[in-house]
Image: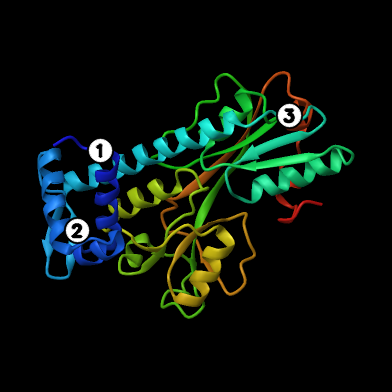
Amino acid sequence: MDIALRHLRVVLTVAEAGSISRAAATLKIAQSGLTTQLRRIEQGFGGPLFRRRADGVVPTELGVHVLGRAQEILDEFGDLITTARTLARPAEPPEAIALGGVDGPWVLRIAGLVQDRFPRHEQLTYLESSSQAVLDLLRTEKIALAVVGEYPDVVAPSLREFNARDLGTEPLLVGLAPTHRLAHRRAIALEDLAGDTWVAPGDRLDGLGVSLRIACERAGFTPRFRYFGADQATAAAIVSGSGAVGVFPATGGPWPGLVTKPLEDGRLWRRTRLAWTAGSPLAWLAATIDVGALRSRGHQPA
């Protein structure tokens, strides 16, 4: 059979659910139908993607490879749709100053700085689902400044055609409820979270979901994502109220009701970069931003 995008979504759903029965409930199909469909998908890939156990399923070595690439392919396809729709929007009026980025505190801090420097201009801020979508806006001059991120084991966006500078690399922290069994530790090993329920990184956090999955698989387990689509504030509320765990940037917060801990090996991090074109009206600002002062700004624009 020919493998299609819908088959990749099926495989990812099975992996996230951890069992055929739960995946069938999520997909709203009969368990026998899903079993038959999964068998055909595995034949298409040339081998079993999951090992069946009494308590559910776990990916095989082939399955780990397929899951990682499947998520990348679906993300890229989503980027294509988002980018096409964005580029189809009419250009903003020239008196507006626009910037864009993926979700995170850096975007709002820079938006606040731009608002301080250009108080009489209308300001537009685009939050996109990927760095590539942000750079497409920059390339077509729909924004004057882009904030992009990089994560380990995920292909970094190419900035060769733009001017760029680093805002720094920061560790990603594990967020726990204060009552969590590991909340007393100064640092946490990723392996110790193998049995926990996870809040999946939001759609607007670029490649963090893939990066987290790969880090967990290297630690010997597949994260049990049970909550999806939450922004960082909502993810913090879920973690504090449900006992699930999640990952959060070191520059974010504070998150009420949440305890954040570094990972012992520092295997999860985020690098943030600014990008702009030579003719950008914010070129001088981007080149002269005091990163230390920017770090000290709060979440909300001034």
Q: What numbered label is drawn on residue 4?
A: 1
Residue at image position (47%, 74%) is 183
The label nearer to you, 1 versus 3, is 1
* Above-or-below relation of 130 to 39: above
Which kind of residue does numbered mark 2 sit on?
Answer: Val
* Above-or-below relation of 54 to 32: below
Query: Residue 87's image quarter?
Result: top right
Q: Which residue is mark 2?
A: 58
Depth order, front residue of 71/150: 71
Q: Secondary structure at mark 2?
A: strand
Separation of residues labelled 1 and 2 (CA atoms): 22 Å
Say whether marks 2 and 3 touch (CB < 8 Å). Answer: no
Separation of residues labelled 1 and 3 (CA atoms): 44 Å
Query: Residue 200's image quarter?
Result: bottom left
Depth order, front residue of 34/18: 34
Residue at image position (73%, 24%) is 280
Q: Is residue 263 left or right of residue 7?
A: right
Q: Earlier in the sequence, mark 2 or mark 3?
A: 2
Separation of residues labelled 2 and 3 (CA atoms): 48 Å
Q: What numbered label is drawn on residue 287?
A: 3
Depth order, front residue of 160/30: 30
Task: In the displayed orientation, state which residue is furthest to the right.
Answer: 120
* Above-or-below relation of 12 to 29: above
Query: Residue 29's image quarter?
Result: bottom left
Residue at image position (52%, 74%) is 240
Which kind of residue does numbered mark 3 sit on?
Answer: Ala
- Residue 194, horizontal then vertical, whole percent: 31, 65
Which kind of residue does numbered mark 1 sit on?
Answer: Ala
Q: Earlier in the sequence, mark 1 or mark 3?
A: 1
